[in-house]
């Protein structure tokens, strides 16, 4: 099966199901796929593993505040393999695809065991950085009804950051540290650029609300 045909089938499959939340819709998947294609080419990895894994990495919808959240990537890997088997996708590639999907999740904390898994993980984490990362952060916070920031200490300088209480705290709980977790050279380079953009955003926000971000 050609990758172009597989991508069409994956798109159709995902279009038929719900998304877990507004930040994990089909456009999110499409951007992760684009990131994956760039990283796969740069790192000379196996696109027959990375591309289906990227398309199907969120194929099971689990809400951010669900108790099953840490199991989401395993559930997605199970469903992805079931779907790919129905397409008669090469069986020898399925364990690698399964691992790449299961290991992509930040909350699952599974060690990547292949270059392809590193690429899918990096591609997904790039989605949490830069302009799109800022947008998705506030989209998620808004959908969950989380206040924007602590008016007394918006940048968590004198208190522990808690992104369940304040949306902006997610920058300090997770987002600003993602660049250090990137596994590929190309992913790390792009992550650092996007993180710098986010730091500039925080500085601008601080200037607008009258409190320095750093």
Image: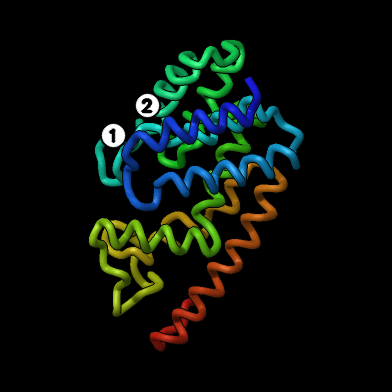
Mark 2 highlights which residue?
Answer: 75
As measured in the structure, the alpha-carbon distance from the residue carrying label 2 to the one carrying label 1 is 9 Å
Q: Is residue 140 left or right of residue 51?
A: left
User: Which of the 4 image quarters holds residue 149?
Assistant: bottom left
Instruction: Work out which quarter of the rendered image holds the N terminus and state it.
Output: top right
Which residue is at the front of the view, 10 or 151? 10
Q: Residue 107 or 119: which is nearer the viewer?
A: 119
Residue at disc 2, secondary structure? helix
Label ID, residue 68: 1
Compared to residue 209, the image places residue 6 above or below, namely: above
For the residue labelled by badge 1, is the local secondary structure a helix, a strand or a loop?
loop
- Residue drawn where x is 34% and y is 56% of the image: 140
* Horizontal relation, residue 66 to residue 36: left or right: left
Of the numbered discs 2 and 1, the one sitting upstream in the chain is 1
Q: Position of residue 153 (x, y in %)?
A: 34, 76
Q: Is the Cβ of the residue at disc 2 closer than 8 Å to that at disc 1? A: yes
Q: How is the image coloured?
A: rainbow
Horizontal and vertical percent position of residue 82: 43, 17
Q: Is residue 124 visible?
A: yes
Using residue 192 as the reference point, say whether residue 32 is left or right of it.
Answer: left
Q: Determine the residue positioned at 56% across, 32% down.
A: 7
Dot 1 surroundings within 10 Å: few (below 14), some, or many (20 or more)?
A: few
List x then y, in percent, for residue 184. Answer: 68, 42
């Amino acid at each position: 099966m050609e990758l172009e045909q597989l991508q069409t089938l994956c798109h159709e499959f995902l279009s038929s199901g719900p998304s877990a939340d507004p930040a994990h819709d089909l456009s999110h998947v499409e951007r992760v796929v684009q990131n994956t294609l760039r990283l796969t080419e740069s790192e000379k990895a196996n696109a027959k593993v990375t591309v289906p894994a990227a398309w199907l990495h969120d194929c099971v919808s689990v809400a951010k505040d669900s108790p099953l959240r840490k199991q989401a990537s395993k559930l997605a890997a199970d469903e992805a393999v079931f779907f790919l088997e129905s397409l008669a996708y090469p069986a020898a590639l399925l364990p690698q695809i399964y691992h790449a999907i299961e290991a992509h999740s930040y909350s699952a904390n599974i060690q990547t065991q292949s270059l392809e898994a590193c690429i899918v993980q990096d591609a997904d984490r790039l989605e949490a950085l830069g302009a799109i990362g800022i947008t998705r952060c506030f989209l998620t916070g808004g959908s969950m009804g989380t206040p924007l920031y602590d008016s007394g200490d918006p940048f968590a300088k004198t208190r522990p950051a808690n992104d369940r209480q304040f949306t902006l705290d997610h920058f300090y709980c997770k987002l600003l540290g993602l660049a250090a977790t990137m596994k590929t050279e190309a992913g790390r380079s792009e992550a650092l650029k996007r993180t710098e953009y986010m730091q500039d955003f925080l500085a601008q926000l601080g200037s607008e609300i009258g409190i320095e971000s750093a």
